[in-house]
Amino acid sequence: MTTIAMVRAAAFGAGLAMLPGGAAMAGTYDITVDRIAIDTGDFVKRGVGYNKSQTPTILRWREGEEVTINVTNNLSEETSIHWHGLILPFDQDGVPGVSFEGIAPGETFTYRFPIVQAGTYWFHSHSGFQEPDGAYGAIIIEPKGREPFRYDRDHVVQLTDKHPHSGARIMRNLKMMPDYYNRQQRTLFDFLGDAAEKGLGAALADRGDWGSMRMMPTDIEDVQGFTPLINGKGPAQNWTGLFTPGERVRLRFINSSAMTYFDIRIPGLKMTVVQADGNNVQPVTVDELRIAVAETYDVIVRPMEDRAYTIFAESMGRTAYARGTLAPREGMEAEVPEMRSPPLLTMADMGMAHGDMGHGAMQGGTHTMPDGSVMQGAAHGHMDHAGHGAADAGGDPFYAPGSGLTPEAANGGKVLSYADLKAQKPLYAHREATREIELRLTGNMERYLWTINGVKHGDSEPIRLTYGERVRFKFVNETMMTHPMHLHGMWSILDNGSGAWNPVKHVVSVAPGTTVYMETEVDAPGQWVFHCHLAYHMEAGMMRKVIVEGGPAAKSASSAAVTGG
Ligand SMILES: [Cu+2]
């Protein structure tokens, strides 16, 4: 019996009930948290899994349903489940020490909350390194009404970066030696190559700049040596999703990696993006998309031929790839492309050495685009390039001008940009923010310390918000790594210049050397967290507690009282 079937059986066994009138439903779901063996095809390791399986559990819910989820902890340590992207009472959010006490070994904890949204989401442990160790699954919520797009079948495509080391061991190694897992150190040979190309002086100056940053131009992934999985299967194990030629197939991409961004493409197929982070967007057709850690994108593809297609997802740093197959029948395969060469960070990614352009990005000023047009600081809300396909303007506005990280399509076609995302229907009335909060993303590579405004979580004061306000968050990335920032409990409205149609997300990825704005309607009382979703950055301190003061008491918690402060 598959995991999906098991969960469904559990739901029906406990009586999935449609109440009179057909509006309200209630379902009960059972999840066990177990130590399991995980076989990636490259190695076998001990890890954590839900319902005794390395195949991620899929929870299928309906908007308007009241869900009851019994989580039984079969581990010898505390666990928790966070429902990533779900809007719910804060005491159901599953962050130990903030939302609740955690789930002790041997204990069964019952979550209960109404489902007030639809789309593709996921869930994961918020305890220790259980998520990198395998504790994640998918959530699919069917909408009450009709979808604004058509599809004939759907597949979850859940990615992760499975490492042979446990999460705890990776953290110890990174703390001891921050470049422990960076295998792409540049060599003397590369230096000689640079010197030949740029001249010895420039190559030396370049080296000096990088040395003083204590970074390397190859510091794109600080944890390498993993095997990417799709739905629990390594590249050789080749997860396969079936289709009948001519069908519209909805692929629900979820990036459940600890640390890895992926560039996803399906050679031979265009992908029409219809949803980002669970919220419908105006359809945009692309050849390739980059998915940040913890994001979801739903795309529709229409394979017409009676043949196999490869789902190819290279890590952003090109150290590994995930591979799966769409095929009319099991056992078919298509060609697996070669990985492209790894990107190199540039001075622009340091947020320096590019004169006015770099400063424009850092300080929210203006800079001139290569085509001569002028835009405000990276990703500022009033540029008029948004939605026109950022490539037309000479670069993706969500990367620093001259960045080595700007994605390009393997076939020379269209890559999805944040600038392309427009809400299908605005979720909130558009209004001016009531105030701005600046969050500088900071770090010290030498000590593997990742911080916000230079302060690590353990030494920080909570961010205090007031119920009913609309806060504008200004992210200034002063590090050379890309950070996927995730606020719990409330939506993150990404300012990409689309005004009322700015996309509604739960993760906002901030590239090096850029300033990105998001706004939040503060409509969820209680206490939450706001953090970088890279597992080891969060653990190293890139996190804040958020306290929402005021608001209706009835909404603040479904059972427990607020603890701490
Ligand atoms: Cu999260």
Image: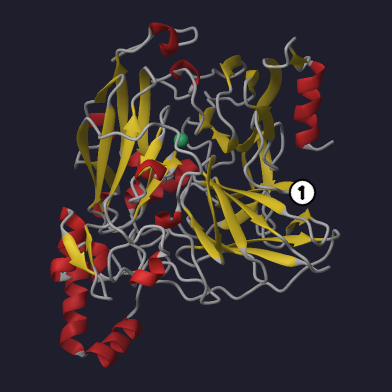
In the image, residue 356 sits, relative to residue 88, either above or below, namely below
* x then y, percent, for residue 111: 58, 17
Name the residue at 51% across, 44% down: 424
- At 51% from the left edge and 77% from the top edge, which residue is drawn? 412
Q: Position of residue 42 (x, y in %)?
A: 66, 59
- On screen, residue 55 versus residue 553, left or right, reads right
Please indicate, yes or no, whether residue 100 appears anywhere in the rendered image: no
Residue at left offset 52%, top offset 43%: 132
Report the colour scheme: secondary structure
Position above or below: 548 against 543: above
Which one is in front, 472 or 225? Answer: 472
Judge from the rendering whether residue 511 lies leftward or rightward of residue 251; answer left or right.
left
Give the amino acid at mark 1.
Asp
Residue 370 visible at all: yes
Name the residue that disc number 1 marks: 152
| Image quadrant where one finds the N terminus | top right
- Where 85 falls versus 206 (above or below)? above
For label 1, the crowd category at 10 Å Cα-Cα, with few meaning under 14, some 14 to 19 and many 20 or more, is few
Q: Nearer the viewer, residue 69 or 387?
A: 387
Assign the C terminus to one quadrant of the image: top left
Name above or below for residue 211 compared with residue 565. Answer: below
Please identify the quarter of the rendering in which residue 390 is found. bottom left
The image quarter containing residue 63 is top right
Q: Position of residue 228 (x, y in %)?
A: 59, 56
